[in-house]
Amino acid sequence: MSQKRILIFSLMYYPLVGGAEIAVKEITDHISKDEIAFDMVTLRYDRSLPKVEQIGNVTVYRVGFSKKGPTPEDLISFPLYLIKVFYPWLAFVKALMLSIRYRYNASWAIMSYAGFPSLFLRIVRRVPFILTLQEGDSLSHITGRFRIRAVFPLYKLVFKKASAIQSISKFLASFARSMGATGASTVIPNGVAFSQFAQKFSDEELLTLGRSLGAQQTTRYIVTTSRLVPKNAVDILIMSLKYIPHDIELIIVGDGPDRAMLEGLSVSEAVAKRVHFVGYKDLSEIPRYLAVSDVFVRASRSEGLGSSFIEAMAAGLPIIATGVGGITDFLKDGETGLLCKVNDPKDLAEKILLLLSHAELREKVAATGQAYVLGRYDWSFIRQQMILHVFNKF
């Protein structure tokens, strides 16, 4: 079999990662270069990052301007926000240069905004493209951004001209159809490194982590692993603490532009001593925080799928979530998790107390959720599905 070559367009990539970036790396790292070689054009959002770098099986080309060590707030503020606005054109120019050197079987757009350079490359170079939908924001937020509204007919053309569409949830597949998609469509979710998240830690390891958090003998932890942005509703989780006993504390793993606001909220809600902002942690460190906790919670306002939920389920934690977006693909209320209402801290508190006060329910939900993930979301299975239903078509 002759080697294929695929050009990936992704707004961000390592070391700044979320579910979409992790998915790309998990899929590409375990595909032989003899089978498929991957190039990527992404933003150089930090000036200290090299313009060209090999990350696993992906040759990464970075474009755009930035500064050294930008904060999450910098990246959503002027002038660095402009690199996102200009990314489609910067990426397209770089892709044209690369297409002179290499023959691409297809390009692969990671989320709809990255579909613009894929569309341009199809028009100019006749390179077919794969559109992967990983969006976690609400559809009104996605389509309401000025940079989308200003070119909305062109945005819809991204969906119409995509040769294949891979959505991580049924919800996003429905969104693609509503935008006029006509290409081959398949739902393949993000996966989880099951063995990594299901690993067992010694009592001493967990005691050491607990002591670093100031745990007392009776302390119980709820945990969320979330970017600190409005859609993840960490504010609702913080507000729910005032309705539950003081021995229940919250671990927040993640960072983002809302951190200062959320720290202030924990003070104004008089729960600051019970909230632990541990900041961004590498994926390899997250299982330890899940293992020390009793319940995983994210009361999302919107969600494309929610890889953090899948990771918590793999770790054997019961989960609580809202029924928005792609969450209902894996959360069956009372079976694989509990559903809570959107923007309702009191209802969320009731669901947290329900799990913490009923050991039998907590254990049943955790075991059912873990078994559900093992059968459907292991990365080796997801990888096979991508090769069979997506990459082999080009």
Image (tube, grey):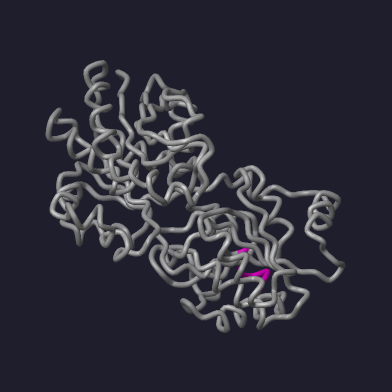
Residue name at image x 36 percent, y 25 percent: 36
Q: Residue at position x 51%, y 56% from top?
A: 257
- The answer to whether 389 appears left or right of 305 in the picture is left
> Going 23% across and 42% down the picture, which residue do you hit?
116
User: Is residue 365 magenta-colored?
Assistant: yes
The furthest residue to the front: 79
Q: Is residue 366 left or right of residue 323?
A: right
Q: Residue, x 72% and y 79% (percent of image)?
A: 357
* Residue 304 placement: quadrant: bottom left
Above or below residue 287? Residue 231 is below
Q: Is residue 61 above or below residue 376?
A: above
Which quarter of the figure has residue 276? bottom right
- Quadrant in which the N terminus appears: top left
Query: Is 269 on the left-hand or right-hand side of 18?
Result: right
Q: Is residue 118 magenta?
A: no
Q: Quadrant of the C terminus?
A: top left
With 278 as the anchor, is 92 left or right in this view?
Answer: left
Q: Is residue 18 visible?
A: yes
Q: Position of residue 180 (x, y in %)?
A: 15, 56
Q: How many marks?
A: 0
The front one of 9 and 81 is: 81
Residue 6: x percent and y percent?
A: 31, 29
> Visible in this render: residue 370?
no
Q: Which residues are magenta?
A: 362-367
- Where residue 208 appears, as percent x and y from the top left, is 83, 51
